[in-house]
Structures are given as structure tokens and as C-alpha cells.
Image (cartoon, grey):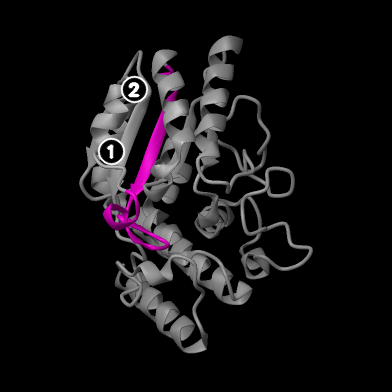
Amino acid sequence: MNKNELQKVVTEVRKGIIESTYHAKSGHPGGSLSAAELFTYLYFEVMNIDPKNPKDPDRDRFVLSKGHTAPGLYSTLAERGYFDKEALKTLRHVGSFLQGHPDMKGTPGVDMSSGSLGQGLSTAVGMALGAKLSGKSYKTYCLCGDGELEEGQIWEAAMFAGHRKLDNLTVIVDYNNLQIDGTLDEVCSPYPIGPKFEAFNFYVINLADGNDFDQIKAAFDEAATINDKPVCIIANTIKGKGISFMENKAGWHGKACNDEEYKAAMEELKKAGEAL
């Protein structure tokens, strides 16, 4: 896909995020929106996947370690053709296969149940090691939140991945500098992020604008050239990206739109799509 096509896709992904959380009357739009370009690029450009065969043993794996941003993952999966987009309106409803956090047993395309922060990276490391031990060529990608880096288990997993030289693992940090209680430095600073991963033998790529497809492409192209080390892409993003009244507001970490906000958000996204 060219950049314009990707922009059209990510606009639809954002619509799905707003739609699903609005109908759920709950959920986490802020971090889903900040990672929308990352989800889109992974599922439409990077990963070896087949929506018609979601359990293909040779597929690339994706672990959403910050599992509360499931609306972003679900919207991307629907856009990619794993299930009907109408299902997004059932998010968090009783009986729906779209739970508040990813469920690998019930949702097509979800490789790992996640949501307890810090645990996803350990699972991704296990997947990457499993590929190495079984002689498989699939790659594993793991999206972490920047606030999630305050969890000690993240660094245990990073230590193991670096020690084992898991060059089939790429960690992406959605670095929007906001978590539920405020900015990272106010809550419990994980800085400096890059040097910490480098200390655990990761190759670190600092992505200045994680909401720009040209820069995202350059980062993943560079990551694909690295051998003998796992890769960490630190993607600077904007929480609530694409919805003007949500951008850079910690309050939108875990709050759904009301009727008026929903209409305003969807109208803004409609205009963004028409501009493309």
C-alpha cells in the first residue's frame, strides 16, 4: 500500500475505535488511537498473516501487551478482514467475542490473551524462543505501553530476550508519555527508555513520529536488517491522535464518548477521510 492508502485504512481503524467504545460505554480510546498507525502498518504491511487462516502455524505472531487498548487491535483486525466490522458495536457486551481485553480463545486473529500489564512481553519472548527452538521462521511482534514499562516483569523478559539474542522479536513501545494518572515522569518515570533496552542487548530504534507512515516504514525496514539482537522501536505518539479534543489528554485513557462527543469525533474522522 502507498501512504495515502494506509491513511485511509487508519482513518477507518480510528472510526472503529470510537464506534466500539461508544457502544460499550467504556473502554480505552486514548492509547488505541495513539497506536492506530502502528496497528495498521503491522497488519497491512509487515506481518506474514492470512485472515482466512488465522491459526496458520507459520504466521507471524502479535502480542498486545498493553491489552486494555484492545479496541485498536479489534478495529484493525476487522479492517483486515478477520471478522465483520459490525461486531465492533458489541465490544464488552455479554456474549460478545470482543471482550474488554484480548481473548485468544474467542477472537479470530488474537494470538495471546493479555491485559495484566507487564506479562505480554514475557509471552512474546516465549513465542520467539519457541520459533528458534523449533526451527521456524515466523517473527513475533509485541506492543507495549510506555507506562507499562514501570512493571518489573518487562525488564526480566527484556533481559532474557537480549541474553538469548532473539533477533526474531520486535518490541514496539507506544511512547505517548501519558498513563491513567498523568505523565510518566509524574507517576513513576521509566526514563531513559532507550538506554535501558540497550543495556539488555536490544538494538534500539527511536521513531520520532510514530503516527507518520513514512517514519514507521523506515523504522521497520531498519529493524528487518538486524541480526543477533532483539529490536525495540520506541515510537513517539500522541495519545488520542486523530480526535482533536482527545489529543494529549490523560483523561481519555479509559473513558468512552458521550453522544455529543461521539458525533463530533465521527464527524472529524469523516472529514479526515474525505480529505484523502
Residue 68 x/y as whole percent: 54, 55
- Quadrant for residue 45, please give it: top left
View extreme (right): residue: 95
- Quadrant for residue 97, please give it: bottom right
User: Residue beneath label 2, please?
Assistant: 200
Residue occupying the point 34% across, 68% down: 242
Q: Helix or strand or loop: what does disc 1 sit on?
A: helix
**Can residue 174 be found in the magenta stretch?**
yes
Report the span colored magenta: 166-188
88 up-or-down from 131: above or below: below
In 3D space, how far apart are the residues under numbered discs 1 and 2 (Cα atoms)?
A: 11 Å
Residue occupying the point 58% across, 30% down: 59
Disc 1 marks which amino acid? Ile
Considering only order in the chain, which callout, 2 or 1, is on the residue closer to the N terminus? Answer: 1
Horizontally, residue 272 falls left or right of residue 88, namely left
Horizontally, residue 239 falls left or right of residue 205, namely right
Closer-to-camera residue (42/250) = 250
User: Residue beneath label 1, please?
Assistant: 193
Residue occupying the point 61% across, 11% down: 134
